[in-house]
Image (cartoon, coloured by chain):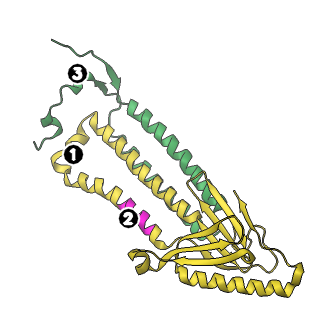
Amino acid sequence: MMRLNHLPNQRTDEHVILFMRRHWFAILTIVVAFLVLTGTPLALGWYYWESTVSSWMETPVLGPLIVIVGSIYFLSIWLFAFLEFTDYYLDTWIVTNERIINIEQEGLFHRTASELDLAAVQDTTAEIRGILQTVFTYGNVFVQTAGSKGRFHFKNIDNPENVKEQINQLVEEDKQRMSRLGAGGRKGKAKIVD
Amino acid sequence: MFELPNLSISISIFLIVFGAYMLFYILYSLFNIYHLVKYGIYGFGLYVIVTVFTCGTILLVGGSFFLLAEYDWTTPITLEGASEYYNEDLFPAL
């Protein structure tokens, strides 16, 4: 279990500035899918109860079969919703005054944790695309690094413009701190831990 | 005239399928909870999530057992019996 006041490989004087997950719209999508998938068969069952379903349930073979298939269906929906929520919950981006930590969960069996020193940041881009992202003010932030490791992608986060500004400001502050430290300061690097 | 062979299987075979699914469900859920606890951010929310999921599972499984307990699981499924159903039995509204 990770604690925000005790990050992995935490440095002296390092503290968390931003802690981000995907926008709440991601949760809304899971909730709506869950409600549609559970509500539709329940509504159909209720509507056709008198005419058809009640007689099916009294049949000695079909009745238990319906209950078992129904149980498996609803348990699967519940498990699927929980898996999707776990994926949402474990995808996190942490920006400290010294580095960016990117933790991504892709399914249950693939997890990537990467970190990047602010000194290695070359460019940040905020992207808001489409009607929904414009209305609810969420989108993507891309952090381009100096190395060949590619770029960090903060997916569907709240207020990407603001996040971009804060990262740029932190990068500037980090550069000033590094210049105060002189030539003995640490060099920027991107580390990928799988 | 063609005659169906008199094969008979108890409907408790459905319970075996349900049991196998429940085993898969429990293993997958435990693995998911382990992931949440191991990699999640420490806080009250984490306990709420695990508790809500566990309570939902208990309700669904409890409801299923409650409904399943009403049936006679020694009833055989026979091919002859299956051929006795007509549309009027399955769709009384027709």
| Magenta stretch: helix, strand or loop mostly | helix
Residue with the mark numbered 1 = A54
Q: Amino acid at mark 1?
A: Ser
Specify the label residue B8 is tagged with.
none
Q: Residue at x 17, y 50 (%)?
A: A50
Q: Which residue in the structure is indicated by mark 3?
A: B80
Whole-number angstrom distance, CA of label 2 to CA of label 3: 44 Å
- SS of the residue under disc 3: helix
Contact (CB < 8 A) between labels 1 and 2? Answer: no
Camera-side residue of B13 and A5: A5
Residue A123 location, x and y as percent? 64, 78
Label located before the other in sequence (1 or 2): 2
x then y, percent, for residue B59: 43, 54
Q: Are marks 3 and 1 in contact (CB under 8 Å)?
A: no
**Circles 2 and 3 on the same subunit:** no
| Residue at the extreme left of the image, as rendered | B94
Question: Badge 2 sits on which subunit?
Answer: A
Which quadrant holds the C terminus of chain A?
Answer: bottom right
Q: Which residue is denoted by mark 2 in the rendering?
A: A32
Do marks 1 and 2 share a subunit? yes
Neighbours of disc 2 within 10 Å: few (<14), some (14-19), many (20+): few
SS category of the residue bearing label 1: helix
- Which amino acid lies under the numbered mark 2 shown in the image of this protein? Val
Image: magenta residue range: A27-35
Q: Amino acid at mark 3?
A: Glu
